[in-house]
Image (cartoon, helix red, strand yellow):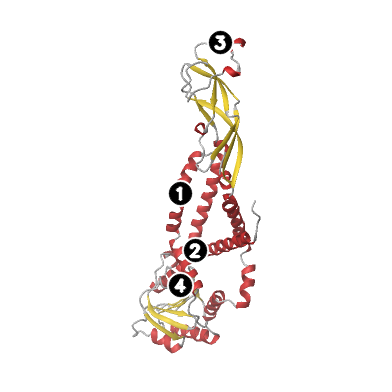
Amino acid sequence: MTPFGLADVLDIAFVATLLYVVLLWFKRTKSAFVAAGIFILAIIYLIARQAGMYLTSWILQGFFAVFLIALIVIFQEELRSFFERLALWSLGRRRLSPLQAKEIDILLHTIAHFAREEVGVLIVLKGQDALERYVEGGYELDGVVSKALLQSIFDRHSEGHDGAVVIEGNRVMRFGVRLPLSKEFHKLTGFGTRHAAALGLSERTDALCVVVSEEKSTISVCREGNLIVARDIQMLEEQVESFLKQKRPAPTLRWSVFVKSHPWEKAVCLAFAVALWLFLVRGFKPATETFRIPVAAHNVPAHLQLVSIKPSAVAMTLAGLKRDFALLNPMYLKIYLDLQMAVKPGPHLVNLSEREIQLPKELHLVQFDPSSVAVQLELTETKTETAGSHRSTDEIPELKK
């Protein structure tokens, strides 16, 4: 057996980390329930296969045959976002200075001013997710966050005042952009189009959206698919600072936060990665196993009847990969002798071969022990069993196939 080495440790650690990232990614989306449903179906399939539930196994096996295509269709948005973030992380991007305390104060007081003046406003604070797929139109700006700039953008005479402003770091990158609308109408009761757009973007990305209602002069915050009405400017400040702290944590805290957060999720992902390694890596090693298989007969001619098969079970040795044996249920294995060529009563010697048993295509037969069985047949009409009527073993004819 190949020893467990450093490469195996790194292999398991990488897969566990990847599973952990994907789990957290799906956990904050509605697709997490779909992933849980697929996992439950997989457990049911394994149980049904081991319990001999043929119909259930057949139906679920057909589903998992197209599982990869179903996975791409169901999680297409999540997969696209995941690969976008992976590309941004690996290729790098322009590093912008985060919002400082002075700039946050300017932003908050400007929003409060808009609320007092009953000016409709939609401001997007970008998180770590790419927004290019979700925002349309608008104008490129790349300006420093300031009260004068924001007031000029949302002036009623400005061409882009009805759209959203996108702030990345301490820069106003775009204005006058259109956002995808939410379909969660029960959350939007009493709110307008700006709120639907803000909620729609927060459902698809990790951005934080601030909305000022032109009719009610209220300030709302949309984050992670939730809409919250800020009671006052202090509540808005708490939401913004919490968002900025989460999306841009201090470098000295990143490792400790990663180690201490989500311990159960980490344990589950590590256990699953180890199970995959045992099943796929160790499972690809060749192996042989021997099973005790019962012998039965079919296609017995109408004028004959089966009296006995000796021995009634034989040892069968199979070869394949370890993972194939893990999925094999020995209950499915049985040797069926085809006796349609038997025309005379008496003892018959049947040589065993792979034709007498249906094996999974991944496994192949090594040997039977013994390699033949003795079948005793009698006429259906009369039974003439006397001690002297039996032939010796040397005289038993071999049944031709």
Q: Choose the circle earlier in sequence order: 1 or 4.
A: 1
Q: Please, is residue 74 above or below residue 330 in the view?
A: below
Amino acid, disc 2: Thr
**Disc 1: CA contacts within 10 A as few (<14), some (14-19) or many (>=20):** few
Residue 41, image x and y in percent? 51, 49
User: Crowding at label 4, few (<14), some or many (≥20) Cα neighbours within 10 Å?
Assistant: some
Earlier residue among tags 3 and 2: 2
Is any atom of residue 203 visible in this view?
no
Tell me the quarter of the picture where residue 244 sits.
Answer: bottom right
Label 1 to label 4, Cα distance in Å? 33 Å
User: Tag 1 or tag 3, which sits nearer the N-term?
Assistant: 1
Residue 384 is tagged as: 3
Cα separation between marks 3 and 1: 55 Å
Alpha carbon distance from label 3 to label 2: 77 Å
How many numbered discs sit on the rendered protein? Answer: 4
Q: Secondary structure at mark 1?
A: helix
Q: From the image, tell me which residue sits under label 1.
A: 65
Q: Which mark is residue 130?
A: 4
Residue at screen point 50% across, 35% down: 358
Question: Disc 1 and disc 2: Cα gap in Å?
Answer: 26 Å
* Disc 3 versus disc 1: nearer the observer: 3
Packing grade of label 2 (10 A; few <14, some 14-19, many >=20) is some
Of the pair 288 and 261, the residue shown nearer to us: 288
The amino acid at mark 3 is Thr
Q: Amino acid at mark 1?
A: Ala
Q: Which residue lies at the image location 54% right of the left edge and 27% below the top edge?
A: 351
**How far is disc 3 from disc 4 in space, using C-alphas?**
87 Å
3 or 4: tag closer to the N-terminus: 4
